[in-house]
Structure formats: structure tokens, C-alpha cells
Image (tube, rainbow, N blue to C red):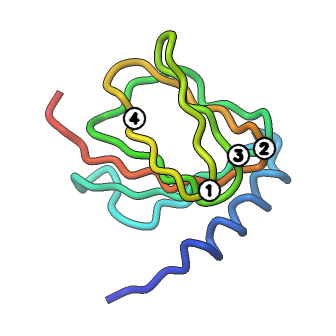
Amino acid sequence: MQKISIDALARQQIAAAVAAPSGRAADTVFGGHEKVLRQTVMAFRAGTQLSEHLNPGEATVFVLRGCVRLQAGNESWQGKAGDLLIVPDGLHSLEAEEDSAILMTVGKTDR
């Protein structure tokens, strides 16, 4: 059994993202490339974006702090702390509207 404070990790990753030249920081808390399920706390400085990409399987974004915008095609969804966004299949991007941290959960599928 392992216990992780996601709230503390979110604070830590936001501080790292704000200081990083890329404006981003991340820490995988469960799983990884060898597992089906992967959970990663990702943080973004305001205005930083994950450019358009495909997800490797089913995915959700749980907003821990701040405010983000998920875009897929002509549709977009804003997520604030406490919101769960279901990532659509297909190309999508994510932008931080303010300093933000998310918990990204991905269940890889055979695609």
C-alpha cells in the first residue's frame, strides 16, 4: 500500500511549472508505459498549452487547481478545480487559462 497526497503534489508541480522554461511539469503517480492504467499529475503555467495530439486510449482530466480548456475540433470545454473532463477520441489540445494542475488518467487500449 502506498499513499500519495495529490494535493501536495499539485502544489509542488505548479511551483515547478511556473519556474520551468517550458511552463510545464509532471509526475506519474501510478502506472507507466508498461501498465494499462497511468495517472499523472501535470501542471502548467498560465497560457501554456499541450499542442494537438491523440490519446493512447480512454482518458480523463480531473482539474485539481486552476482553470484549463480542452479543445477538440470546433468544440471546447472549460474545466475548473473539481471538474472532470472526459477526453474525446481524436485530436485534442489542452491550454491552461491560469496556473493549473490536473490529474490525467489514461487507460491504454489496443489502437
Please tell me whether residue 8 is drawn above or below residue 77 in the rendered image: below
Residue 25 visible here: no
Q: Farthest residue in the top direction?
A: 74
Quadrant of the frame with the N terminus: bottom left
Q: Secondary structure at mark 1?
A: loop
Neighbourhood count class around disc 2 (C-alpha, 10 Å): few under 14, some 14–19, many 20 upward:
some
Mark closer to the chain start, 4 or 1 = 1
Neighbourhood count class around disc 4 (C-alpha, 10 Å): few under 14, some 14–19, many 20 upward:
many
Question: What amino acid is labelled 2 in the image?
Answer: Glu
14 left or right, relative to 21: left
Q: Secondary structure at mark 2?
A: loop
Q: Nearer the viewer, mark 2 or mark 3?
A: 2
Q: Are marks 2 and 1 in contact (CB under 8 Å)?
A: no
Tell me the distance, in whole angstroms, between the alpha carbons under discs 3 and 1: 14 Å
Question: What amino acid is labelled 3 in the image?
Answer: Phe
Mark closer to the chain start, 2 or 3 = 3
Residue 44 — which label? Answer: 3
Mark closer to the chain start, 4 or 2 = 4
The residue under label 1 is 81
The residue under label 4 is 87
Please tell me whether residue 27 is drawn above or below residue 98 in the rendered image: below
Neighbourhood count class around disc 3 (C-alpha, 10 Å): few under 14, some 14–19, many 20 upward:
many
Q: Nearer the viewer, residue 87 or 16?
A: 87
Residue 98 — which label? Answer: 2
Mark closer to the chain start, 3 or 4 = 3
Residue 73 visible here: yes
Q: Nearer the viewer, mark 2 or mark 1?
A: 1
72 left or right, relative to 79: left
Question: What amino acid is labelled 1 in the image?
Answer: Ala
Tell me the distance, in whole angstroms, between the alpha carbons under discs 2 and 1: 11 Å
Residue positioned 26% across, 47% down in the render: 107
Residue positioned 80% across, 40% down in the render: 46
